[in-house]
Image (cartoon, grey):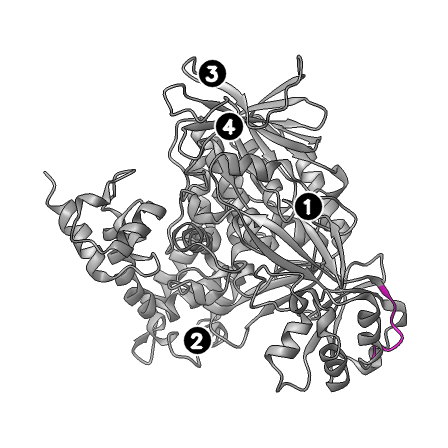
């Protein structure tokens, strides 16, 4: 410990001779962000502690029993390419696999899988328990421990850490007074900070049904000067499938050729379980409209912002009043249970209204609710208070990941966790953080959106958010990211060699198609036609039938989109040139009197690291960037 710093708890609580545990990296919370953070830090050799209030809920799917989806499936494949756990876990426990958007181009293809919810959770926990350098501990974190520098301006007692004091988080204090000390702390607290659940007029403290809330961490963050706000999310009822009349619903089977998420798996052999589709109707909508005064979102009981793209059923009925029905997906929660998740009917209406809703839906008239829907309000920390490494700008050695950053979704949380855990471990080794650019990964788009633009609603990834999505296909994530992961130490040599062999085969076949001609045209050019596929090439050159199907697919995609990618690469290069023009930390924007007041305020708040990031801040104009460019280009 630096002798120039003194250790202080952020709270006023004092414990005599506490038990102290020492780690390199501490991760608080063992959901999708926390488990990926802890696993990544441990893979990099850091002695890692993973703290959770309940070891039986490690990796739990709090809401829908599925992984992936549009935009999200791309993230899962990137997590896997970087050595993360999510892809391998869903491959091992999935009960239905589908590739969404197959009729569109490959940049839009998005894998999704239904999970056996309990088995998925068990698989993640098994990975955590079996990971060297990682210790799972059941603890309730109540406080942060910091070091403060005596040269910093004091605001009173040592425990009263002001917003403009330099502070470094060095551990946490748990219920009972024990302390965990570490060089870096990663907070992945999900929806549990000052959480409150709503079902009708009933309010209950808790971030998930059957569990409590966390209060001390919110206060600790605020005393560090970190601003907090409130978001809302919700979850639908679960039904007993025994009483569902599936003959009145539409069957939705999985793909005949299920594709794995993990690049370590060539194929899946799994007995798939069908999902089903049901619909609401005007009778349901009339019931909801007549009970809006009892809905927390409309009665004023909830005033925080929820996810616009995943509205509650009561919000759908109001916002889309012209729609006569809304689609509901009946998703099995596992092979060993009859519990069914009703995707599309998230609600916080009272219990009696929820009961009556299902009596009016064809196929669900006799179904019994096992778990009622509810909404959750919780604290989050607006993410523009973070560096691109996910380290706090206001307290060093403190990293935030997951829903605490204002995001929603398992996949977005896991991606943040992996990067935060990686960067915490890299910082201990004196290495530069892993910051992925927008042309490298959807994960780079995610983090840049969060730290540059902030959020005004729970953030969810979509393919439309990625301007370079032709480069960021789900099928090439390993080629993009695994070599980088190997250099960092996130993946083993075997995985790296696998990607290198695949790339060599792609290059070999591409070169071969360049030399073989059909009607005077090289096959590499011929295949760019929309109507031409691999089977056509095999018809001309039968020995191509021996080429591995995954390699063949990559060759075709690369060739078909070569022209588009070349044009997109021009924009990528322009962004890279701007990114190379670094802005010094804590640059004084008052030195540029010509800069607009709005631009100056936003630059001072966001503290962009380079001109590329500065240009992506909402409300910043090309003229603002030109002023910065002239200033930095004119410096000696």
According to the image, label 3 marks what residue? 1
Q: Dot 2, crowdedness within 10 Å: few (<14), some or many (≥20)?
A: few
Left or right? Give the position of 502 relative to 127: left
> Which residue is depicted at the point 85% across and 58% down?
337
> Which residue is depicted at the point 54% across and 43% down?
417
Cα–Cα gap, marks 4 and 2:
76 Å
Q: Which of 490 and 51 is in front in this view?
A: 51
Badge 1 or badge 3: first in the primary sequence? 3
Cα–Cα gap, marks 4 and 3:
21 Å
Residue 123 picture location, percent across and down: 71, 45
Q: What element carries label 1?
A: loop
Left or right? Give the position of 387 relative to 281: left
Left or right? Give the position of 372 relative to 295: right
Q: Dot 4, crowdedness within 10 Å: few (<14), some or many (≥20)?
A: some
Residue 449, quarter of picture: bottom left
Badge 1 or badge 4: first in the primary sequence? 1
- The residue range painted magenta reads 363-369
Badge number at residue 160:
4
Badge 4 or badge 3: first in the primary sequence? 3
Q: Is mark 2 on a helix, strand or loop?
A: helix
According to the image, label 1 marks what residue? 59
Badge 4 or badge 2: first in the primary sequence? 4
């Amino acid at each position: 410990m630096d002798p120039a710093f003194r250790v202080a708890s952020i709270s006023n609580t004092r414990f005599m001779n506490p038990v102290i545990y020492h780690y390199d990296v501490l991760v608080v919370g063992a959901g999708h962000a926390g488990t990926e953070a802890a696993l990544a830090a441990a893979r990099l050799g850091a002695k890692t502690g993973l703290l959770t209030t309940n070891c039986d809920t490690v990796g739990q799917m709090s809401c829908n029993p599925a992984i992936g989806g549009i935009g999200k499936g791309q993230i899962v494949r990137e997590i896997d390419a970087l050595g993360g756990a999510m892809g391998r876990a869903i491959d091992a426990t999935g009960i239905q696999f589908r590739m969404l958007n197959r009729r569109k181009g490959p940049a839009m293809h998005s894998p999704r899988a239904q999970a056996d919810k309990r088995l998925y959770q068990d698989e993640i926990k098994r990975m955590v328990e079996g990971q060297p350098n990682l210790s799972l501990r059941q603890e309730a974190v109540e406080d942060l421990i910091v070091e403060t520098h005596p040269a910093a301006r004091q605001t009173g007692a040592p425990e009263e850490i002001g917003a403009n004091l330099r502070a470094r988080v060095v551990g946490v204090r748990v219920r009972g007074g024990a302390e965990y000390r570490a060089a870096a702390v990663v907070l992945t607290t999900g929806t549990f900070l000052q959480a409150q659940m709503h079902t009708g007029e009933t309010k209950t403290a808790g971030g998930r049904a059957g569990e409590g809330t966390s209060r001390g961490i919110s206060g600790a963050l605020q005393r560090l000067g970190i601003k907090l706000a409130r978001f809302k999310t919700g979850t639908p009822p679960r039904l007993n499938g025994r009483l569902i009349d599936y003959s009145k619903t539409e069957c939705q089977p999985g793909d005949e050729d299920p594709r794995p998420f993990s690049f370590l798996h060539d194929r899946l052999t799994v007995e798939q379980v069908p999902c089903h589709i049901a619909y609401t109707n005007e009778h349901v909508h009339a019931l909801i409209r007549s009970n809006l005064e009892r809905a927390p979102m409309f009665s004023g009981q909830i005033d925080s912002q929820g996810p616009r793209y995943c509205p509650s059923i009561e919000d759908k009925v109001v916002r889309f009043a012209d729609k006569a029905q809304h689609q509901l997906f009946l998703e099995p929660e596992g092979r060993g249970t009859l519990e069914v998740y009703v995707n599309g009917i998230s609600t916080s209406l009272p219990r009696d209204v929820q009961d009556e809703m299902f009596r009016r839906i064809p196929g669900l008239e006799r179904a019994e609710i096992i778990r009622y829907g509810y909404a959750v309000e919780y604290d989050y920390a607006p993410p523009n208070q973070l560096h691109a490494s996910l380290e706090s700008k206001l307290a060093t050695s403190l990293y935030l990941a997951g829903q605490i950053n204002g995001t929603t979704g398992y996949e977005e949380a896991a991606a943040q966790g992996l990067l935060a855990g990686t960067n915490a471990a890299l910082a201990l080794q004196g290495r530069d953080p892993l910051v992925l650019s927008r042309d490298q990964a959807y994960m780079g788009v995610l983090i840049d959106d969060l730290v540059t633009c902030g959020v005004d609603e729970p953030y969810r990834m979509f393919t439309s958010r990625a301007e370079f999505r032709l480069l960021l296909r789900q099928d090439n994530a390993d080629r993009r990211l695994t070599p980088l992961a190997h250099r960092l130490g996130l993946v083993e040599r075997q995985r790296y060699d696998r990607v290198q062999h695949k790339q060599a085969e792609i290059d070999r076949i591409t070169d071969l198609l360049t030399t073989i001609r059909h009607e005077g045209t090289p096959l590499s050019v011929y295949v760019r036609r929309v109507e031409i596929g691999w089977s056509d090439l095999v018809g001309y050159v039968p020995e191509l039938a021996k080429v591995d199907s995954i390699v063949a697919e990559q060759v075709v995609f690369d060739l078909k989109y070569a022209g588009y990618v070349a044009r997109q690469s021009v924009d990528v290069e322009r962004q890279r040139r701007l990114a190379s023009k670094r802005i010094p930390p804590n640059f004084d924007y008052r030195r540029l009197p010509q800069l607009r007041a709005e631009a100056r305020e936003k630059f001072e708040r966001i503290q962009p690291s380079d001109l590329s990031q500065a240009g992506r801040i909402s409300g910043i104009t090309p003229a603002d960037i030109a002023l910065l460019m002239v200033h930095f280009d004119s410096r000696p």
